């Protein structure tokens, strides 16, 4: 295949990945990697490199819109970035020594988990007890609900911090934003309201990915010819998705995509086990 | 806090312009690359790493000045990677203005971690 044709195919595929990633809340990275490796036979290291770059673009692009709305908890994000960036470096280092088969299997498992998480019920936790550590770190905040500020408290700071370290490590290892794992930490453990956790986790994804991208770049995982259509396509797709999301929140659509993503995940696991990746 | 709000607005603009600028550079480099190599055969099925032109900072900059498409794309990607890092640096300055030294320390810790990642020689 010539460079031009492959570039156009990847551009179209990345656009679709960005769109679906945005509509489901899965993110473009977890969809573009199976697309590149299973359908286009791209080596998984190049796929991970290109995906990670696209993750930085979509995270920064949408964070730009969110921070202006004042929902993002910047202190909480900044504090947890210590965990995610140090996790990301660890993941990027481990990626070099972990055989490709294991990376594919792990990827599939995280993908299935993310698909399941995209179907969860969203809860706006606000009435939490005050935690001493959260108070000391000034993590509690307010966010606008119907133009009125609502106060929330953050609990289980330590547990959330450790979970964020794990999320960062998965991001650095697999080249994804690992938004689903960040949601586990923030919604599930720290009991942050859903809107705040989504925007804050998105805010953190960019810098987390940047921490491992500097390692990937030096290691040659980021191929410009491949990263170019991926980053442009995913970004445009995510932008389109953010415009659609306002109008439709179809439950059927979410289930449909969750099934497709699970199918891709099983393929990755199968290829990993059979060693055909 | 009004100051908080100002910093948020500034960070929002920084992120938006960082992404737009880096995408413009990527598209510019991509056009040159496709114009010159569009008809070559592409093969990404075996991992071969990258030549210095696209993986070493000094070589990327030299490649940009000699108008190498792949080096220009890589410069755009470097700008993209730099965008969230610049955001952390700006937050640090915002916290200094607010005299919130706990968070100045936290932001600096994040920057130190990224610097270690960059210069730690983990790329080999």
Image (cartoon, coloured by chain):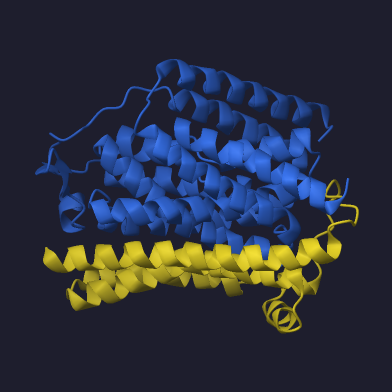
Image quadrant where one finds the N terminus of chain B: bottom left
Q: Which residue is painted at 37% across and 39% down in the image?
A: A185
Residue B44, placed above or below residue B71 = above
Residue A265 image offset from top left, x and y in percent:
64, 27
Please identify which colour was used for chain B in the image: yellow
* Left or right relative to A53: residue B70: right
Res. A247 visible in picture: yes
Residue B30, placed above or below residue A131 = below
Q: Which of A80 and B82 lies nearest the eye of the viewer? A: B82
Image quadrant where one finds the C terminus of chain B: bottom right
Residue A263: name its quadrant. top right
* Left or right relative to A91: residue B16: left
Q: Which residue is painted at 44% across and 27% down in the image?
A: A118
Q: Which residue is painted at 33% across and 59% down in the image?
A: A78
Residue A56 image offset from top left, x and y in percent:
52, 55
Residue A264 image offset from top left, x and y in percent:
66, 26
Which lettered chain is shown in blue?
Answer: A
Q: Which of A25 and A181 lies nearest the eye of the viewer? A: A25
Res. A80 visible in picture: no
* Left or right relative to B58: residue B117: left
Residue B13 image offset from top left, x and y in percent:
35, 65
Residue A271: name its quadrant. top right
Q: Which of A32 and B64 lies nearest the eye of the viewer? A: B64
Q: Which residue is painted at 24% across and 37% down in the image?
A: A193
Which residue is the extreme one toward the left?
A: A148
Q: How many marks?
A: 0
Which residue is the extreme one toward the top?
A: A252
């Amino acid at each position: 295949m010539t460079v031009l044709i492959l570039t156009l195919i990847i551009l179209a595929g990345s656009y679709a990945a960005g769109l679906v990633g945005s509509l489901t809340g899965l993110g473009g990275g977890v969809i573009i990697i199976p697309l590149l490796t299973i359908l286009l036979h791209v080596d998984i290291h190049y796929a991970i490199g290109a995906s990670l770059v696209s993750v930085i673009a979509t995270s920064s692009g949408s964070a730009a819109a969110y921070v202006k709305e004042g929902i993002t908890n910047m202190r909480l994000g900044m504090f947890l970035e210590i965990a995610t960036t140090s996790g990301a470096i660890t993941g990027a280092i481990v990626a070099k020594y972990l055989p490709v088969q294991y990376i594919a299997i792990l990827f599939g498992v995280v993908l299935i988990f993310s698909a399941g998480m995209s179907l969860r019920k969203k809860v706006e936790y606000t009435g939490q007890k005050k935690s001493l550590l959260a108070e000391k770190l000034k993590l509690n905040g307010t966010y606008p609900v119907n133009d009125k500020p609502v106060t929330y408290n953050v609990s289980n700071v330590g547990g959330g911090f450790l979970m964020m370290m794990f999320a960062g490590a998965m991001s650095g290892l697999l080249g994804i934003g690992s938004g689903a794992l960040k949601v586990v930490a923030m919604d599930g453990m720290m009991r942050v309201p859903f809107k705040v956790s989504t925007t804050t986790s998105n805010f953190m994804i960019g810098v987390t990915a940047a921490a491992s991208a500097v390692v990937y770049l030096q290691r040659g995982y980021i191929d410009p010819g491949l990263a170019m259509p991926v980053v442009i396509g995913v970004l445009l797709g995510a932008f389109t998705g953010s415009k659609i999301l306002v109008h439709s929140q179809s439950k059927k659509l979410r289930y449909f995509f969750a099934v497709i993503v699970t199918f891709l995940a099983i393929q990755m696991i199968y290829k990993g086990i059979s060693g055909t990746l | 806090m009004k100051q908080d709000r100002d910093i948020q607005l500034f960070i929002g603009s920084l992120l938006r312009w960082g992404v737009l600028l880096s995408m413009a550079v990527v598209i510019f480099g991509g056009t040159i690359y496709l114009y010159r190599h569009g008809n070559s055969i592409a093969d990404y099925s075996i991992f071969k790493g990258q030549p210095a032109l696209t993986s070493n900072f000094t070589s990327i900059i030299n490649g940009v000045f000699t108008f190498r498409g792949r080096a220009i794309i890589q410069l755009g990607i470097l700008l993209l990677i730099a965008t969230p890092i610049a955001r952390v640096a700006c937050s640090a300055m915002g916290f200094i203005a607010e005299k919130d030294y706990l968070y100045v320390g936290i932001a600096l810790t994040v920057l130190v971690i990224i610097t270690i990642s960059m210069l730690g020689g983990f790329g080999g």
